[in-house]
Amino acid sequence: MKIRRILATAVAAAVTTPAVLLSVTPAFADGKPAAQTQEKPSVAELEKAAAAAQAAYDEAVAAESAAEAALEETLSDSFDLAVAVTAAETAAAEAATAKTDADQAVVDAETAVAALPETATDEEKAAAATALAEAKAAAEAAAEVKAAADAKVKAAVDARDDARVAAARVLGTAQKATEQALADKTAADAALAKAKEEEAEGGEEDDTCVPEAKLTTVVTGLPSTVVAGTKVDFRLRVTNGTEKTMDEVFPFVYAHATDRSGLNDLDDLVHLQWSSASSSTWKNVDNENYIEKISPLKAGAHADVKLRLTVDAKAPAGNGVTFVAGDYWNADGSCGGSPDLEGYEFMIAAAGSDPGKVDDAKPGTSKPNTPDVKPQTGTSATPVSGSLAATGSSTSQLALASGAALAIGAGAVFVVRRRKAGSHA
């Protein structure tokens, strides 16, 4: 949704070149700050990306199939390591039988020695003793052979099982890669489909969006003075004061600052971050100045968003304003948003300053001094007296910018909506 960035452009322009607001034209509606310019990919580029995503997905599926086949192979009896286990187990069984026989031979030889009669000759006694000794030696050798065979079985089993575990891990990795590739493919296909749909529509403007004054955005806790080199936390409350649920609400926040002259832009030195009430993770406000959508926001309900403003230490003393608003989009295609930007003005104190106890910033109520601002609908905004070219303190310059944004407000902001459900780009 381009609504808010148009106003952000107007604000920045009003501070350095106030007269630009004397001719708010449809051409201006398509503009956005240079720092925020992003080229949308063409349909051809998206087709190429979708084809690449499809190819990557196909490769991932093939890799997963190969990994699954490899795992099945390790589980089969014909797997070489499984065959080695079988051979080792056969050898171990034979060694166990040989040891059992050798042990029995020792028992038999001991029985024969014990059974010798008292009348046995020395030759008979010597022969029995020799047979016993040989049986014991054979039993010891059989035991060593069995131990070695058992060790080979264990090594073969470990090798087979390690191969199976490794194959299972490869399959798991391949499955995750397939899932990611499918997600990438789905996203690429969706982006292409959306681009083709927008191309088929020929970029026609969506004039179904309407101003909704009962969608309110209120800032609390933003100090009226912020010291350079510090960060301050505050809150934004978005309230649906209507009697209908808003399916998707997109909070808008934009910080603008100048030095005391009001002529030098300090936007690069002020930064906004946000965090949901249930999360401690801070995220940068996107380059369209939107926060992640609130979905849904029921009738009469509100949602709080944590905000953090950081002013770089190298920022000079100056003045700033934080603008907030809200846009909504419903599943039935209806859409709209706050008719105006609410501006909360604050001063920037030089790094190391001690401003002491300060009040919270209050929403500005100033209006631009322009006799006849023409909104993009072609109707006139409420005339006020004075001249846009009037100069003064930096505070008045920011007030001018704040008022300019408000003046463009309801008549201009909704005619440029081309956003589809779920998108605010």
Image (cartoon, rainbow, N blue to C red):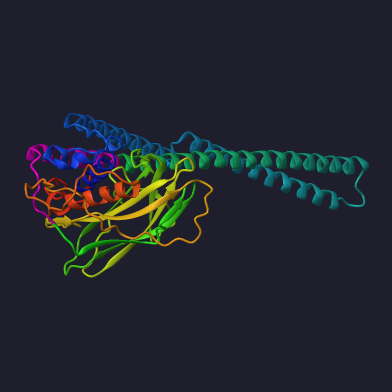
Could you tell me residue 126's position as x and y percent? Answer: 89, 41
Q: Is residue 138 left or right of residue 398?
A: right
Which of 348 and 62 lies nearest the eye of the viewer? 348
Quarter residue 18 falls in? top left
Residue 243 percent coordinates (x, y) = 16, 70
Examine the rendered structure and indicate whether residue 396 appears above or below residue 29.
below
Q: Nearer the viewer, residue 65 or 256?
A: 256
Rendered position, 219 above or below 33:
below
Range of residues picked out in magenta: 182-210
Q: Magenta span has 290?
A: no
- Residue 206: in magenta span: yes
Answer yes or no: is residue 250 visible: no
Q: Position of residue 415 (x, y in %)?
A: 11, 48
Q: In front here: 263 or 145?
A: 263
Q: In terms of secondary structure, what is the magenta stretch mainly?
A: helix
Residue at 40% across / 51% down in the picture? Answer: 347
Screen quadrant of the C terminus: top left
Q: Which picture quadrant has residue 335?
A: bottom left
Residue at the location (60% across, 39% down)?
Answer: 155
Q: Which one is in front, 422 or 46? A: 422
Q: Residue 72: where, in percent of width, then height?
A: 39, 40
